[in-house]
Amino acid sequence: MLKAYLQIWRSGLFDRKWYWQQYPDVQARRADTLLHYLLRGASEGRKPNEIFEGRWYLETYPDVAADGINPLLHYVLSGASEGRQPAEGFSVQEYLEQNPDVASSGMAPLLHYLKFGRGEGRSLGYNDDNVAWKPASRPVAPPPDAWRELADRPSSGETALVDVVIPVYRGVDDTLACIHSVLTAQNETPHEVVVIDDCSPEPSLTARLDEIASMGLITLLRNDRNLGFVGTANRGMKLHTGRDVVLLNSDTVVYGDWLDRLVAHAAEGVGTITPLSTNATICSYPAVNRNNKQELEISFEELDRICAEVNCGRSVDVPTGVGFCLFLKREMLERTGYFDEEAFGRGYGEENDLCRRATALGWRNIMAADVFVRHTGEVSFAASAKEAQRKGMRTLLRKHPDYMTLIRTHADRDPAAPLRRRIDARRFGLRYERNILFVSHTWGGGIERHIRDMSLMLEPSGVGVIVLRPRYPDGMVAAFGSPEAIRIPNLKKLDLQADMAEIVELMRLAGVFQIHVHSLAGWDDRIFDVLPALAAEARVPVDFTFHDFMAICPRINMVTPSGQFCGGPEREKCRDCLKGDEAFSGVDVERWQSRFRDFMKGTRFRFAPSRDTANRVKPFLNGMAVDIRPHPEKNLIRASMAAPFRDGDILRVAVPGAVGLHKGAEVLYRAAAHARLMNLPLQYVVVGYTNRDADFEKLGNVRITGLYAHEDLNEIFVRERCHLAMIPSVWPETYSYTLSELLSAGFHVAVFPFGAQYERLVETAPDLAISLPMEGLTDPAMINWCLLDSRDDIVTKMDRASVHFERKYTYASYYESIDV
């Protein structure tokens, strides 16, 4: 115990403070937190830090569970070095690939995230499991009338070719829903439904099974004593030795002609067939090797129809079948024998053993990608499931020492990934018949908000949005996502160039009818050739929005390394600017601009969020039209978050956001330093953070509130009691959502007289506008005197100020009503 204690403690992966705060009962006992975790916490499913999930780790890696070792200790000793994942929502590989600095540092990814990445706002990766999905409702037993209706149906009279064997122990709702789904499914394959009651401890279930059997709907067998799953399944498989068998767990639901589709895969040499399911390890969907408990945007029956449509006849070889729904060919069973009751006792691992024995005799195990069966998981035999899993895995590994290596190799290759991608894409295509593929970066910010707003704007027109982003920095591997949080975890790793043919097919399945580029930042240079080629192959048009000036300036915002707005592109000036910045010293600005210009020639429409932006990019485009499309926004309801200014008050100026170089950090610092030097009655409040917080705080007249959630912004404004606000951006912003937030909060706003921030301010709220002198960009005194001189205006104009800038669009008014 002491050795384990020290090994975990030295790893840095046990967060004492977090554990203490998370579990009040541990606080009450005043126990040593790590000792509590080792003695009790891990077995109770408690987490040792914000990320690591011990229960998930043991379920995902049954060989670890079989060893009976503390999950975090295993991860520390060998799991991390073996590339195992610490939690469902944290991918070590993705974290390293998305953060090259972490990879080069040599620090363990999970440790880095806990110590630094979390505070820096780094993403856990492109994993939809980071979203708090709503769990799907469990199956419910059908009403009594439903069985009587089935009993009235005429019998086909055909001799059964397949036995559908359902071992039963407990779970009235799940079991009856399972049996009913099998009986109501429309299949042409003659089959017999064999239900085996393994001495169920639930009298109500026993009685209902008797009723159903008395109607002639099922063949009901009862064990004289409880045999467990293995013995019960063997009894069912031996019942009719001339028939193939489908072993079906009692916590499953089948749909449509599921059996016909399974049988269609039973070609020569195929021994076992497993469908896709919510909970089926390597055959799971949407996320592989997961128990997908979450509700989808469609029913599971609809999901099965999609599988049948997009993956008709498609299958992949797997190292083992999965026992929740397993088709077993009789010819194979005659050679392999049945489940090994002596070795596996009451259950777990028996089907894996059988499949490996079948493989050794030349039989194939396949996954049928055109069949989906819901599996809620471990209902009938749940009471002793965990211990049975551990024993079963130990037995399986004794008989087949290479089993886990085979499973990991299969998982690494993941041959079913293209088939799951087809389902993901079609699900999206069914939600909206027409979808726009937005191309963007991974940096968040205003573009991210615009994409969400565009998605909401397009929805009433029956148009959806799929977002394409670079998965890794400066690469061509793409991740598709949904701003509406549709769970499509399989569309996360496609190479735009190498996988173009597949992507075109996925776009067709998803109903993509146009591409709209919002940013090419973060992509490899090949994107300028590959994206037009992709659009041509898919036969869809491409539109572009200028959210910044990346097309003109490699530094994106026309701000020099010293933090000054350059005034606009000029060949020699641009060369000198880039030459003086090590990060861009090798960039040929003429080639950069030419590359973007050539790309723009292939676009249908080019949008700018403001007139100022349009006027700045038009000269660069050699006559190509630019259409002005201010971002869609709801009607602004002006609140009163600004504190009233009274004589004698120190003027408090709110500066919101992440204030870096282009957002005016240097201008703000010089202004604050001047105000302190001159002892001016002026205080700046950065509602957010800067690129040099420590330097600002040393001044004494600047307060940094820190990173905030958007929904907390108004509360912060009220708490900080600021009288007016300032946007010190030194570049001509293309829109400025920050301005919208400040106007909504009721502030007078000071900006330099250029860019969309000024254009929008004077057009929508002239009474709230404070124009900072351009000289203030270099002379901080001009900023401070301007703000102090505005004190009378913010008193006299506050009550009569009005704001008007509601913008509503439809798909037609945004994309089809183009300015000429």
Image (cartoon, rainbow, N blue to C red):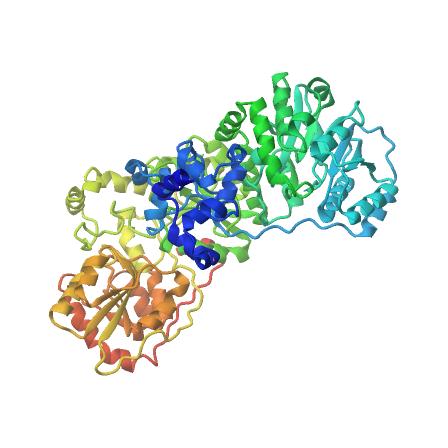
- Front-most of residues 411 and 799: 411
Residue 25 shown left or right of residue 785 in the figure: right
Q: Is residue 589 above or below residue 83?
A: below
Q: Quadrant of the C terminus?
A: bottom left
Residue 209 shown left or right of residue 90 in the figure: right
Q: Residue at x 33, y 37 (%)?
A: 524
Residue 309 image offset from top left, x and y in percent: 64, 37
Residue 552 image offset from top left, x and y in percent: 26, 47
- Whether residue 636 appears in this view of the structure is yes
Q: Residue at x 13, y 64 (%)?
A: 779
Q: Is residue 542 above or below residue 688?
A: above
Q: Is residue 631 above or below residue 491?
A: below
Residue 279 image offset from top left, x and y in percent: 60, 40
* Residue at the far front in the pictured view: 2
Q: Residue at x 47, y 39 (%)?
A: 71
Residue 789 image offset from top left, x and y in percent: 19, 76
- Front-most of residues 218 and 740: 218
- Front-most of residues 234 and 260: 234
Residue 774 shown left or right of residue 807 in the figure: left
Q: Quadrant of the N terminus?
A: top left
- Whether residue 215 appears in this view of the structure is no
Q: Is residue 660 above or below residue 191?
A: below
- Front-most of residues 287 and 513: 287
* Quarter location, residue 84: top left
Numbered circles on residues, count:
0
* Quarter location, residue 719: bottom left
